[in-house]
Amino acid sequence: MPNHVHLLLTPKVTASRWLAPLKGFTAHGANDLPGGHGQAFWQDESYDHLVRSPAELDRIREYIEQNPVNAGLVVDDREYPWSSATSRLKGGCGQDWPPHIL
């Protein structure tokens, strides 16, 4: 998405240990682009949610993959270059993810 990011992952550490470094790394890269230096890249807030069931995982994954379609950026979720849809349908992106959900 041009103005936000969705991540669906299972971290092994608390969000404070990986989110700030991720934001710092990506903001540094964005500020190296023409016209980006010295401007805030990320908002201060973030949202996280504990996925409690395979059905909820499927619902959230579907929401994320349909986001560019609903925004009118592509017709099919597999057309979006940063979507997990194509890889997932080819057997990638952790088909059995997360393994701890029964």
Image: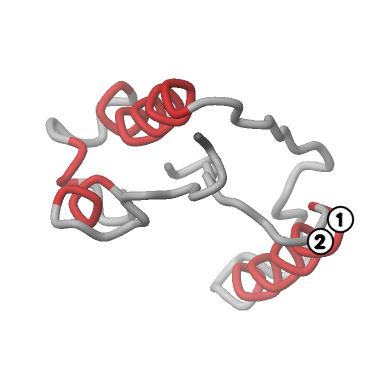
Q: Which residue is mark 2?
A: 20
Q: Which sits in the foreground, 89 or 73?
A: 89
Numbered mark located on residue 33 in the image? none
Residue 23 percent across, percent down from the top left: 72, 61
Residue 100 percent across, percent down from the top left: 56, 46
Question: What residue do we see at 53% from left, 40% from top?
Answer: 3
- Circles 1 and 2 in contact, beta carbons < 8 Å: yes
Position of 64 with respect to 15 (left or right) is: left
- Mark 1 residue element: helix
Question: What residue do we see at 60% from left, 52% from top?
Answer: 10
* Image coloring type: secondary structure
How dense is the environment of label 2, judged by Cα within 10 Å: few (below 14), some, or many (20 and up)? few
Q: Which residue is mark 1?
A: 16
Residue 41 percent across, percent down from the top left: 70, 54
Q: Which sits in the foreground, 69 or 48?
A: 48
Q: Quadrant of residue 87?
A: bottom left
Q: Is residue 22 above or below residue 41?
A: below
Disc 2 marks which amino acid?
Ala
Q: Which sits in the foreground, 87 or 97?
A: 97
Q: Is residue 32 above or below residue 73?
A: below
Position of 101 with respect to 32 (left or right) is: left
Kindly report which numbered mark, 1 or 2, lies closer to the viewer in this rendering: 1
- Mark 2 residue element: helix
Q: Is residue 18 above or below residue 69?
A: below
Disc 1 marks which amino acid?
Ser
Question: What residue do we see at 40% from left, 22% from top?
Answer: 59
Question: What residue do we see at 32% from left, 35% from top?
Answer: 65
How dense is the environment of label 1, judged by Cα within 10 Å: few (below 14), some, or many (20 and up)? few
Residue 30 percent across, percent down from the top left: 60, 68
Point out the image quarter for the N terminus. top left
Position of 57 with respect to 13 (left or right) is: left
